[in-house]
Image: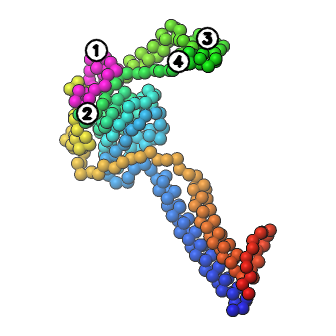
Amino acid sequence: MSLDTDLIIDRRRLKRRLSFWRFAAIILLAAGLFAFFAQNAGFGPSHQHIARVWVSGVIVDDTRVQDMLDEIKEDENVSALILRIDSPGGTTTGSEALYEKIRDVAEVKPVVAVLGTVAASGGYIAAISADHIVARGNTITGSVGVLFQWAQMKELLGHIGIEMKEVKSSPLKAEPNPFSEPSREAIRATQAMIDASYDWFLGLVQERRGFDKARARELGDGRVYTGWQAKENGLIDAIGGEEEALAWLSAERQIDSELPVEDWEVREEPYELATFMGRAMGEAFSQAIAETTQKTLQTEGLTLDGLISVWHPDRR
């Protein structure tokens, strides 16, 4: 076969290959656009349903969760909200923000909390934001209280010859700290801060569970309770799980028991469209270029422009 014939055949093959990759690029672009807009379309389903939100792990001031709860409140496709709580608590501010957002939802649609293995401290704050609380008999809950801890490292540093020095604007600045023994004034100031947060927590328990101040303080001494103990003391409403929560919604709030329960999840930060599509298109064209370049290098008699160092055999 002559060199000219080989060139014609190779060019036809190359043209077909490039046509394939143009078509593939169009398909990839369409798929990428669909994925991008689907990713940013919203948090939950578009049909009538009961929303399920999981509160798990350490609770922090997460604006993404708060935005999701705002959308649940406004979404006409959501008939009710089930909170699945499995959390030992978290920051006081995070628990406060979560409580307020759930109460906002409860103003317009019913909310039920279903407690898992543990729903204590900040996890219990999330629970009492609901209209009805269901827990397993062996759920660990309660732990009404506020904690502030710090490590005392002065003696440890002294063993390795390190002594911390400081200059500060006033005696209570950066107190308490791990590098020196706290003064009485620092302990009193810290205790006052803890007491203020604790009074706020007790106030929530008193309001949401219908206790008087003395009963709230009696139950809110920091201890944890099993689900059975919590039910006996009025800290929760029922023993059970999601099935019991759905039964309550149907019986007490006339929510259709046949409605599906759909998980709502926090939406991850979306890519910018240019970045999203750039990555997808870049990968596709890189593969196309690699394959066509490989074919060119294997073709007899074809030359490559630019500075290269490639050896290929002459098959004549």
Q: Amino acid at mark 3?
A: Ser
Position of residue 165 measured from the top left corner of the image (x, y, whole percent): 65, 14
Q: Return the mark for residue 72.
A: none
Q: Return the mark for residue 170.
A: 3
Q: Return the mark for residue 214.
A: 1
Q: Amino acid at mark 2?
A: Asn
Q: CA distance from mark 4 to mark 1?
A: 35 Å
Taking the spot 45% from the left edge, 13% from the top edge, the residue there is 192
Among numbered discs 4 and 2, the one appearing first in the sequence: 2
Among numbered discs 4 and 3, the one appearing first in the sequence: 4
Q: Residue furthest right?
A: 307
Dot in front, 4 or 2: 4
Question: Could you say which is closer to the camera, residue 242 or residue 97?
Answer: 242
Q: CA distance from mark 4 to mark 2?
A: 36 Å
Q: Which residue is mark 2?
A: 138
Among numbered discs 4 and 1, the one appearing first in the sequence: 4
Taking the spot 61% from the left edge, 19% from the top edge, the residue there is 160
